[in-house]
């Protein structure tokens, strides 16, 4: 029902909303140069006017630091516009060309290079598929060497809408360009830590340049969650751009509007006109704007068309405190008992409403009536129904989990102008990507920073590190993945289509892992079973919004799932080796050992008396680091054995 209502608007025009060209103007900065159809009804294709909800579009489509690269690709998310229900998915292809190569040079071209992005705004999350088509058209558009030739862009709009259709394509087309094989090869055992970080709804920041490497890694991690890419991101960009102080002061006294995203508001000059190379000025503006931040809260909006009862809304309260650090626990106060009571009442009301609407107009879809998850026959393909609380389209296991809802954002690329969102009190958390060093430097705004270049996951809080410390069963699982991917590297086709060790195989392993975890928490007397997943981790996860929403419904299909860790079993010598290897790679002491050994090997290759002293110092350093680390390791293995 909800699906038919949600995508009904696409039946005539298809999934692509707009084709947009963004250029860099030497005085005005990033600006819209062309849009088809116009971004605002009634305006021309060359209008530079933007809807308020999409005011960051130019800075997302033409990323900061793009002048350092000949071409790049950006995936980004925009908030829904007024009246719409779901995230708008953006894919942008950036290129630059020398001005002297242009056949037609317009008056405002005053620099040696011209930088532009061609962007597609879609209602469907088809990142790689849109990218493949868009790269070809962008190349052809630049080859014209005359940017006034816009007919090719209009043809792109018509072609995409006629060829893609209004529903998500079946199979692996949704995952085109997202390679879990490459992710596992690069991050190895740490992939599971990333997976668990997002399950805990922590503030996770990915960092690397250029943008295509950033968004590729981030979206690939999300593709490990069953159904997440296809149906789990419809509510992931519910934020409102910053406004002026005067507007904020006025809006605090007014009644909040239903359907408007839970918002952050602050003082800012969003049209900074940040050029490629004007990063320092942008950082200054961002910091000054942060000081003038005037946050306010609005009542909870209905979740993606699921008309939640007033009682249920009251139990999902917006944080009343203004401290970003203390707001997270307030968001996670969902009383599932109360929800279940309100749901029973709601179901009777919905049944009556549905019957009335069917009598009034047969053949038309009802207004997104939520229904409970029912067990489905195993017919070889997933049967999706609207989730009662989440508003997402769920399968019989309750997938995708409602992680990116109620103020938990997914922003594959964040522009500098969106920096304020990291400290916004109405944002529970985020999985976000950044290329600007300003994001990475402010570590207090995130729980973890993922350095993609070095495959490092920096977790700031020691308690969180302890919670995410992999169990023996987790290490076996991660080792199983790494071995299959590395050993089958030469046997699997380049596109990862081979089964064992391939992309789909890896996603299947994570799906099995998550299903086993969900099945385990439903079992009575499950302490021993849950310890394989991590007792502290499971306790933390049970306090998250996504768990409480999932647990508020019944999922009988999980009764058929094995409710134990896929790699449970007795402790062995090989487990000691795994633990040793993991500790050396990830602990601070392990890193000291590695550095000491590198220093030793470097000095051994030199000659002379000074070298002998240095070698002795290096060995002493290595010995002290090793003895200190090994004593800690012995204690941890003893406790694991117990």
Image (spheres, helix red, strand yellow):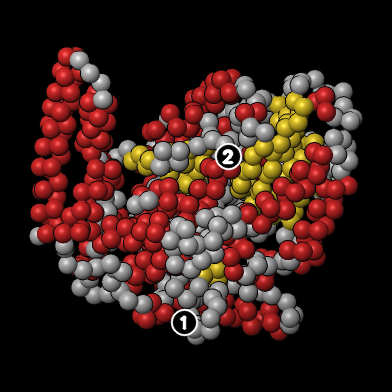
Give the residue drawn at x 87%, y 27%. Answer: 105
Label 1 to label 2, Cα distance in Å? 41 Å
Write down the residue under mark 2: 211
Q: Position of residue 548 (x, y in %)?
A: 38, 63
Marks 1, 2: nearer the viewer: 2
In this picture, residue 297 sits left or right of residue 99: left
Query: Which quarter of the figure is the C terminus placed in?
Result: bottom left
Q: Position of residue 501 (x, y in %)?
A: 44, 63
Give the residue drawn at x 74%, y 35%. Answer: 116
Report which quarter residue 321 is drawn in: top left
Q: Earlier in the sequence, mark 1 or mark 2?
A: 2
Write down the residue under mark 1: 375
Give the residue drawn at x 66%, y 48%. Answer: 91
Report which quarter residue 143 is drawn in: top right
Report which quarter residue 125 is drawn in: bottom right
> How many other residues sit within 10 Å of disc 2, few (<14), some (14-19) or many (≥20)?
many
> How many other residues sit within 10 Å of disc 1, few (<14), some (14-19) or many (≥20)?
some
The image shows residue 366, relative to residue 439, as above or below, that is below
- Is residue 307 visible to us here? no
In the foreground, 382 or 257? 382
In the foreground, 239 or 438? 438
In the foreground, 175 or 312? 175
The image shows residue 202, relative to residue 498, as above or below, that is above
In this picture, residue 190 sits left or right of residue 87: left
């Amino acid at each position: 029902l909800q699906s038919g209502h949600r995508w009904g608007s696409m039946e005539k025009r298809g999934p692509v909303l707009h084709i947009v060209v963004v250029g860099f103007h030497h005085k005005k900065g990033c600006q819209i140069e062309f849009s088809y159809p116009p971004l605002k009804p009634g305006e021309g294709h060359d209008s530079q006017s933007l809807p308020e909800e999409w005011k960051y579009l130019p800075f997302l489509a033409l990323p900061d630091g793009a002048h350092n690269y000949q071409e790049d690709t950006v995936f980004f998310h925009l908030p829904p516009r007024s009246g719409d229900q779901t995230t708008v998915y953006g894919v942008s292809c950036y290129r630059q060309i020398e001005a002297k190569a242009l056949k037609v040079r317009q008056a405002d071209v005053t620099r040696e290079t011209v930088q532009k992005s061609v962007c597609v705004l879609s209602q469907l999350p088809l990142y790689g598929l849109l990218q493949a088509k868009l790269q070809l058209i962008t190349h052809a558009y630049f080859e014209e060497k005359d940017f006034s030739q816009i007919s090719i862009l209009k043809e792109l709009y018509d072609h995409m809408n006629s060829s893609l259709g209004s529903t998500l394509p079946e199979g692996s087309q949704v995952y085109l360009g997202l390679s879990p094989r490459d992710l596992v090869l690069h991050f190895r055992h740490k992939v599971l830590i990333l997976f668990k970080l997002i399950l805990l709804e922590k503030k996770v920041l990915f960092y690397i340049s250029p943008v295509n490497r950033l968004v590729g890694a981030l979206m690939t991690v999300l593709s490990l969650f069953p159904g997440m890419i296809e149906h789990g991101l419809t509510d992931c960009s519910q934020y409102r751009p910053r406004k002026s102080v005067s507007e904020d002061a006025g809006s605090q006294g007014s009644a909040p509007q239903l359907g408007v995203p839970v918002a952050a508001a602050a003082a800012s000059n969003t049209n900074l006109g940040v050029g490629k190379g004007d990063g320092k000025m942008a950082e200054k503006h961002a910091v000054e704007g942060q000081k003038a931040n005037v946050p306010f809260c609005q009542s909870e909006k209905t979740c993606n068309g699921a008309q939640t009862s007033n009682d249920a809304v009251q139990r999902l309260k917006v944080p009343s405190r203004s401290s970003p650090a203390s707001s997270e626990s307030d968001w996670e106060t969902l009383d599932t008992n109360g929800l279940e009571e309100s749901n029973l009442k709601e179901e009777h009301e919905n049944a009556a409403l549905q019957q009335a609407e069917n009598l009034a107009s047969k053949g038309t879809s009802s207004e997104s009536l939520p229904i409970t998850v029912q067990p489905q026959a195993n017919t070889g393909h997933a049967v999706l129904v609207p989730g009662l609380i989440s508003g997402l389209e769920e399968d019989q296991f309750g997938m995708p989990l409602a992680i990116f809802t109620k103020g938990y954002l997914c922003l594959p690329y964040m522009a500098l102008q969106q920096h304020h969102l990291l400290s916004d009190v109405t944002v529970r958390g985020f999985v976000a990507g950044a290329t600007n060093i300003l994001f990475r430097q402010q570590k207090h705004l995130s729980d973890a920073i993922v350095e993609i270049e070095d495959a490092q996951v920096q977790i700031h809080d020691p308690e969180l590190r302890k919670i995410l410390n992999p169990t023996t069963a987790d290490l076996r699982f991660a080792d199983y993945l790494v071995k299959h991917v590395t050993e089958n590297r030469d046997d699997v086709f380049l596109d990862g289509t081979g089964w064992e060790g391939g992309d789909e195989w890896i996603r299947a392993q994570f799906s099995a892992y998550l299903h086993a975890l969900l099945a385990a928490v439903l079992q009575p007397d499950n302490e021993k079973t849950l310890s394989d997943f991590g007792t502290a981790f499971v306790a933390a996860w049970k306090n998250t919004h996504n768990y409480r929403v999932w647990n508020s419904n019944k999922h009988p299909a999980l009764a058929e799932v094995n409710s134990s860790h896929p790699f449970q079993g007795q402790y062995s010598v090989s487990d000691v080796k795994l633990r040793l290897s993991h500790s050396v790679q990830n602990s601070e002491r392990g890193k000291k050992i590695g550095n000491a050994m590198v220093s030793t090997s470097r000095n051994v290759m030199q000659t002379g008396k000074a070298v002998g002293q240095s070698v002795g110092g290096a060995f002493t350093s290595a010995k002290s680091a090793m003895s200190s680390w090994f004593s800690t390791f012995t204690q941890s293995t003893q406790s694991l054995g117990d």
